Image (spheres, rainbow, N blue to C red):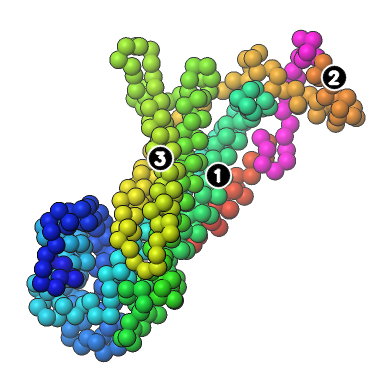
Amino acid sequence: MKLWSKGFEPDKMIEEFTVGADRQLDLQLARYDVEGSMAHITMLESIGLLTREELDTLLDALKDILAMIDRGEFTIEPGVEDVHSQVEFLLTQRLGDVGKKIHSGRSRNDQVLVDLKLFMRAELKEIARSMMRLFDRLQSLSEEHKDTLMPGYTHLQVAMPSSFGLWFGAYAEALVDDMELLAAAYRIADQNPLGSAAGYGSSFPLDREMTTRLLGFHTLHYNVVAAQMSRGKTERAASMAIAAVASTLGRMAMDVCMWMCQNFGFISFPDEFTTGSSIMPHKKNPDVFEIMRGKCNRLQAVPNEVALLTANLPLGYNRDLQLLKDIMFPATVEIRSCLDMADFMLQHIRVKSDILSDPRYDYLFTVEDVNRLTLSGVPFREAYRTVGMQVQEGTYKPTREVHHTHAGSIGNLCNPQIAEKMRNAAKEILPD
């Protein structure tokens, strides 16, 4: 059954090519399609296009469909084009002509836009919750290991003292920036397109403010053409936020892989969290973090996929936009999976203490000693030259003392301030 049917059916090969995986993907939109329809018909009754009795009858039937969805019994039947057609088919099958009234003042264009906005809003919330769990884990580890020193590197060369508190805390604060992008994407998704119809509005006196309230949107996409243009724009914003989170996770995964190898040996995990080799009996591989790194690298390509798919499309709806679901739906699942796995793994991380007692890290303390001389009154350039010559001549002996007190340093991590930044960044998405 097709909502646009005019007495003929398209060629089977044409249908298979144009529908693609849409039926399977649309199952993820089913709840939102029903919720959007409930708001729409409530509005239709308020402007006189449905009677109160018709509204109650339709709402009861839609609630039954919601229950089917919750039980996992909702399917899109063979021959039915999409989720919108399936919901209307079920209503018409049960209620007859009353079911056919549900589409008044609406197009599949604004119907799918509402579904996607509600879907994306919900997915961004779930991503934010996963981010918060990982953020809390990182902050907890930062506090737990704030006094455990480790080498800091530049150009992968031993540079200056760092700490595990600083390392864990750095990724926690990096997630704050990512949350800001996620919040921006959420604001773009949190606008009601319903009533824009096929992109040019309707001659019905639709109450768009009412459906905005009923669906819990923050505001309207006021201009009906702009509402239709938001298809693709919403996905692009969400994809950029997902890519930012993936960038942070991928970089952390690389660090973990590096710190686990024998050349560093800074961290480890229980044996059951690693994998082995079919030929080398000693191997304990960081496969989880290697897969995470690979997945996060792929996720950083998602904005480019969205951009290329939507580039230079003419005004109005174009069927190309259907393919955005193929890109975005798996991406939201993948980023949550990576976030949750990172949190799970970090629950079991083991941190090596006393790393810096190894003589290979002696030069980490050259800057500390330059600064110590400078604080005693020696001009900085002279202090730098003195310590530099000791290094050149092989006479340098580190004091192995670290005194960092400024905000954000080893001795003053500012984790409470970072937590406040995160709360402020997340409050729009996670007000509770």
Look at the image and tell me whether residue 431 can be seen. Answer: no
Residue 406: where, in percent of width, then height? Answer: 73, 41
Please name the residue shown 52% across and 16% down the image: 263
Question: Which amino acid type is marked by label 1?
Answer: Ala
Between disc 2 and disc 3, whose residue precedes?
A: 3
Residue 98 point in image, percent of width and height: 14, 81
Q: Nearer the viewer, residue 399 or 209?
A: 209
Characterize the local packing of mark 3: few (<14), some (14-19) or many (20 or more) Cα atoms within 10 angstroms: some
Quarter the C terminus occupies: bottom left
Mark 2 vs 1, N-terminal side: 1
Residue topped by disc 1: 174
Give the residue type at disc 2: Thr
Q: Which residue is mark 3?
A: 298
Q: Gap between marks 3 and 1, in whole Å?
A: 20 Å
Say whether disc 3 or disc 1 marks the residue closer to the N-terminus.
Answer: 1
Is the Cβ of the residue at disc 2 closer than 8 Å to that at disc 3? no
Asked whether 394 falls inside the magenta stretch, the response is: yes
Left or right of 288, for residue 396: right
Tell me: 143 left or right of 124: right
Neighbours of disc 2 within 10 Å: few (<14), some (14-19), many (20+): some
Mark 1 residue crowding within 10 angstroms, few (<14) / some (14–19) / many (20+): some
- The mark lying in front, picked from 2 and 3, is 3
The overriding secondary structure of the stretch rendered in magenta is loop
Instruction: Say which amino acid is labelled 3.
Output: Arg
At mark 1, the secondary structure is helix
The residue where tag 2 is placed is: 386
Q: Quadrant of residue 23?
A: bottom left
Q: Is residue 45 visible?
A: yes
Residue segment shown in magenta: 390-410
